[in-house]
Image: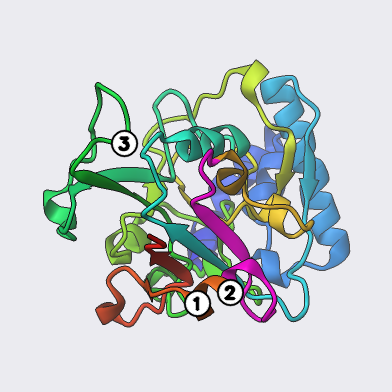
């Protein structure tokens, strides 16, 4: 059953909500898909969200809806010979993207493997203790690979997730029904499901958000990395790139031959994770030394 047919079947429930004075809930439930909304409808939805977040968190939010820039295709590079496994990228991502602290949700996971190994199934996801990096081992951060051929998009029954013109795979949380088909389809374990109501301490909330990015999520929806869409569409680096203390992370427009990421692909021996699956990731790993 698609979302609209479900809504038709839930007409009595919606009528009851309207009679109870919950008009904002009804409007949110009946909200059109993001790509179908006019500017006026989008502005109304953003104002409704601002009011909702103000009541819930006691913070004034900015909810942007900046579109993809023309002639831009974002890509990412990660130098595994420089990564020290400090996980500062993980913590910066959590802070920037309003990820739940309790229960804990993280979009980036960092695994450790022995030198010469590429067996992710045998990697250590929970390494701790001692100094990093550890001799004889290297670390590999893994997050959404922003695939050019994303399997997660193909399986979504409500079209709540799609690929934007700048290559970023996004989610309209108001259309996500929590079926988790996208999670099952993703070979990179890059999506997270909110099994319970996310919790973010008021003093740690980032109010600078994008409708399709780091605005607060709700219970029962799936979320993922969006290359910090709220930053990158304004000409800034993703938070993880800025936080890396050793400069292992590279980011930019792959359509620009002079961009940092284009230079990496041109001059380094790069590989893409699980490329045999034809997902065509726009996330490139390489060793510089």
Q: Residue at x 30, y 25 (%)?
A: 131
Q: Earlier in the sequence, mark 1 or mark 3?
A: 3
Disc 3 on helix, strand or loop? loop
Residue at the limit of the structure toward the left, as seen here: 122
Quadrant of image for the C terminus = bottom left
Q: Residue at x 21, y 44 (%)?
A: 137
- Label 1 belongs to which residue? 267
Q: What stretch is highlighted in magenta?
A: 244-262
Decide whether residue 249 is among the magenta residues: yes
As drawn, is 242 to the left or to the right of 236? left
- Label 2 belongs to which residue? 263
- CB of mark 1 within 8 Å of CB of mark 3? no
Disc 2 on helix, strand or loop? helix
Res. 163 visible in picture = no
- CB of mark 2 within 8 Å of CB of mark 1? yes
Residue at the limit of the structure toward the right, as seen here: 40
As drawn, is 137 to the left or to the right of 100? left
Distance of label 2 from label 1 (alpha carbons): 6 Å
Provide residue 158's location: percent of width, then percent of height: 48, 67
Disc 1 on helix, strand or loop? helix
Q: Image quadrant of residue 186?
A: bottom left
Q: Residue at x 53, y 64 (%)?
A: 76
As drawn, is 31 to the left or to the right of 64? left
Q: Is disc 2 surrounded by few (<14), some (14 to 19) or many (20+) residues within 10 Å?
A: few
């Amino acid at each position: 059953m698609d979302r609209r047919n479900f809504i038709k079947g839930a007409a009595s429930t919606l009528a009851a909500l309207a009679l109870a004075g919950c008009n904002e809930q009804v409007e949110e439930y009946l909200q059109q898909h993001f790509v179908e909304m006019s500017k006026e409808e989008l502005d109304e939805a953003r104002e409704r969200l601002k009011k909702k977040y103000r009541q819930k968190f006691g913070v004034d939010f900015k909810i942007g809806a900046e579109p993809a820039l023309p002639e831009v295709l974002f890509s990412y590079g990660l130098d595994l010979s420089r990564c020290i496994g400090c996980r500062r990228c993980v913590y910066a991502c959590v802070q920037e993207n309003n990820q739940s602290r309790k229960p804990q949700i993280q979009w980036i996971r960092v695994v450790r493997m022995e030198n010469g190994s590429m067996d992710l199934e045998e990697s250590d996801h929970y390494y701790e203790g001692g100094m990093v990096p550890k001799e004889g081992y290297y670390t590999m951060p893994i997050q959404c690979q922003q695939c050019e051929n994303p399997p997660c998009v193909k399986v979504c029954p409500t079209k709540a997730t799609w690929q934007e013109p700048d290559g970023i795979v996004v989610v309209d949380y108001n259309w996500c029904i929590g079926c988790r088909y996208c999670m099952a389809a993703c070979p990179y374990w890059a999506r997270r499901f909110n099994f319970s109501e996310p919790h973010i301490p008021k003093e740690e909330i980032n109010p600078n958000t994008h409708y399709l990015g780091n605005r607060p999520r709700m219970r029962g929806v799936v979320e993922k990395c969006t290359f910090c869409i709220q930053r990158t569409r304004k000409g800034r680096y993703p938070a993880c790139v800025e936080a890396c203390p050793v400069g292992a992370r590279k980011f930019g427009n792959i359509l620009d031959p002079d961009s940092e990421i284009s230079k990496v692909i041109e001059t380094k021996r790069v590989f893409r994770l699980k490329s045999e699956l034809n997902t065509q990731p726009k996330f490139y790993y390489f060793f510089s030394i």
